[in-house]
Amino acid sequence: MKFKLNDSKDELPFKQEGEDMKDEVSSKSSGDSFFDKLFEELMNKRENSTNAGIWKILEEVKSTFSYTPKIGIVGDSGIGKSSLCNALFGREVFPTSGGGQGCTREAQTKLIQTDKGKFEITDLPGIGESPEWHDEYVDLYKKHIPEFDILIWAIKADSRAWKQAIDAYKELTCELKSCPIVFALTQSDKVNPSSKFCFEKMQPNEKQIININSVKERVVAEFDVALEDVISVAIVLDEETGDYKNYNLSSLVTRIVEVLPNKKKKSFTREAADENITEETQKKADKGFWDHIKEFAGDIWEEAEPYVKPLLGALSGKIISQALSKFKFW
């Protein structure tokens, strides 16, 4: 039996280069989690096993769950990137318009500490903002994209000024082979007839849906991507409550989980806002997590299962924990 060495790190070191900006945002930690205590208990019990591989498997469980996902987002300023990120993760990741972020030619990277873990997000400037900087921006994309686990390419749904973005995308073929990408059609509420969008229910009307689908088909044709990788969204900030309301963010999260490697699915749903995660998406993330662990364990899975299985309830959230008695992932 050969074990794969776990060569992933909890986070990438921030690069102190000219175009990089780093910021770290912390939130109150809940202290030692139930998972940490359970993991320690199981690590003690694994001494009863003569197979040293059990230790490696339990370490892989912890490493996989605590992995720091690295998300990249690209798009022009003023199309709702900040609101998209804030609503997606249920916290202020980037300040919205007027908050001082402004247009920049640099990559802005933040490491966000949460009570569940942490995630790293990098905002790349949109190529359409300054066509004269096309080559510089493409080089910036080529540098950062290989570092990401997922790239979200934001496009304003009611805009037709895509030429610069399309040209840049076609120059990133090699880099995107190693990085999954999804397209987010932002501000879909502004697609005609915009007056018909129902903000109370956060839903477009039938005519808007037809026109939104036409925009999606155009993205598919001009960027040469799959239809399922193009998701229309709309984000609105409730000024009274300070909360974000959204249209279709759960579909964006679902698609991101689907395209991420098994090892990284769970870390993304861990950090995404709960309201954006459907029961089906949670199941996909959990299944990916355990499929990865089973593959890592290889031919000693049967011996490892009694040590690993108790972690399922601690890691999988309420939905899967409640359903644990009804199904298994392996």
Image (cartoon, rainbow, N blue to C red):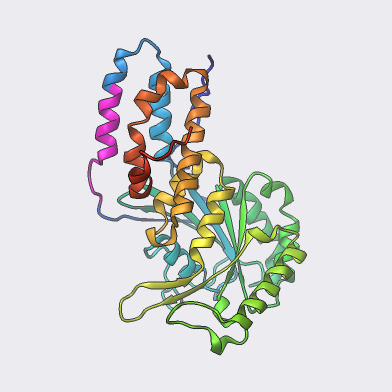
Residue 128 makes an appearance in the image: yes
* Residue 301 within the segment the image draws in magenta: no
> From what the image shows, is residue 203 above or below residue 217?
below
Residue at the top extreme?
A: 50
Give residue 200's quadrant in the image: bottom left
On screen, residue 168 versus residue 182, left or right, reads right
Identify the residue shown where x is 50% and y is 49%.
Answer: 70
Residue 329 vs residue 48, the one in the foreground: 329
Residue 152 vs residue 43, the one in the foreground: 43
Q: How many marks?
A: 0
Secondary structure predominantly adopted by residues drawn in magenta:
helix
* Residue 32 within the segment the image draws in magenta: yes
On screen, residue 186 versus residue 52, left or right, reads right
Q: Position of residue 306 (x, y in %)?
A: 36, 24
Residue 84 vs residue 230, the one in the foreground: 230
Residue 14 makes an appearance in the image: no
Q: Position of residue 152 (x, y in %)?
A: 57, 59
On screen, residue 77 versus residue 314, left or right, reads right
Q: Which residues are magenta?
A: 29-43
Residue at the left extreme?
A: 31
Q: Position of residue 76 (x, y in %)?
A: 60, 70
Residue at the front extreme?
A: 326
> From what the image shows, is residue 121 above or below residue 42?
below
Identify the residue shown where x is 61% and y is 87%.
Answer: 193
Identify the residue shown where x is 43% and y is 66%.
Answer: 87
> From what the image shows, is residue 78 above or below residue 260?
below
Q: Position of residue 226 (x, y in %)?
A: 70, 57
Identify the residue shown where x is 41% and y is 18%.
Answer: 303
